[in-house]
Every structure is written in C-alpha cells, then in structure tokens.
Image (cartoon, helix red, strand yellow):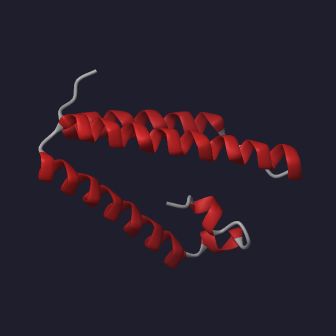
Amino acid sequence: MKSIRELFKNNPSLLDEPEVAQLLEYCEQLQDEIVEFKFKKTNNKELAMLDMIKEVIKGCDATEKEQAEHERFGYDAPNYQETISNLKRYILVRCREEKIWL
C-alpha cells in the first residue's frame, strides 16, 4: 500500500483539504477493520504481532525515504520526534487491543 506522502507528492497542498483529511481517516479505519477481521478469522495473536511489525517497518521505510528525498531535493526534514511518538502510540494501542503485554 502506498503511503500518504507518495499519493500526494505531486500536489501536497491537497492534504490540507477537509475532504482529503476525512478520506484518509476513513482509509485508516478500514485498514484497522481489515486487521481485526484477519485476527478474528484466525484468532491468533501471532498474526496480529506480525501485522503490527510489518506496519512498523513500512513506517520506518517511509521515514527513511522521506529523509533521502530531503537530502536529495531539499524538502522539509522529517519530524522524527513526531514519528517516534506516533510509532510508540501505535504499538501500545495495538498491544492493548490485542491483549499483548510487553
């Protein structure tokens, strides 16, 4: 799945539009529902952990790509503090939802 940055790289100003923000929020909800469906279908916490790890790796790859674009084209630097906070929040929420205690 493409990241938000990839989808809107030709016109990033569209991200400021309320309709686009609603659409992105809806897509995130659908992604969560897909993961929940996979988990309910198999009732396996290992699958939930694997899915979570895959999402973390995708996020890290996207951040690395953003950093490379910054260095190559002079774009705004990634906000690593925000990225780390979002990653930590995502992991903690998913673990709580799946009753996985770290």
Nearest to the observer: residue 68 or residue 90:
68
Q: Is residue 16 above or below residue 73?
A: below
Where residue 36 appears, as percent x and y from the top left, is 22, 53
**Residue 71 appears in the figure:** yes
Give the farthest residue toward the bottom: 19
Q: In this view, does 81 lie above or below 63?
A: above
Where residue 81 appears, as percent x and y from the top left, is 61, 34
**Quarter containing the C terminus:** top left
Count of numbered badges drawn on the protein: 0
Q: Is residue 44 left or right of residue 74?
A: left
Residue located 69% across and 68% down the image: 12
Nearest to the observer: residue 51 or residue 73:
51
Residue located 54% across and 33% down the image: 84
Q: Quadrant of residue 23?
A: bottom left
**Residue 77 appears in the figure:** no
Residue located 32% across and 65% down the image: 30
Nearest to the observer: residue 33 or residue 1:
1
Where residue 33 appears, as percent x and y from the top left, is 26, 60
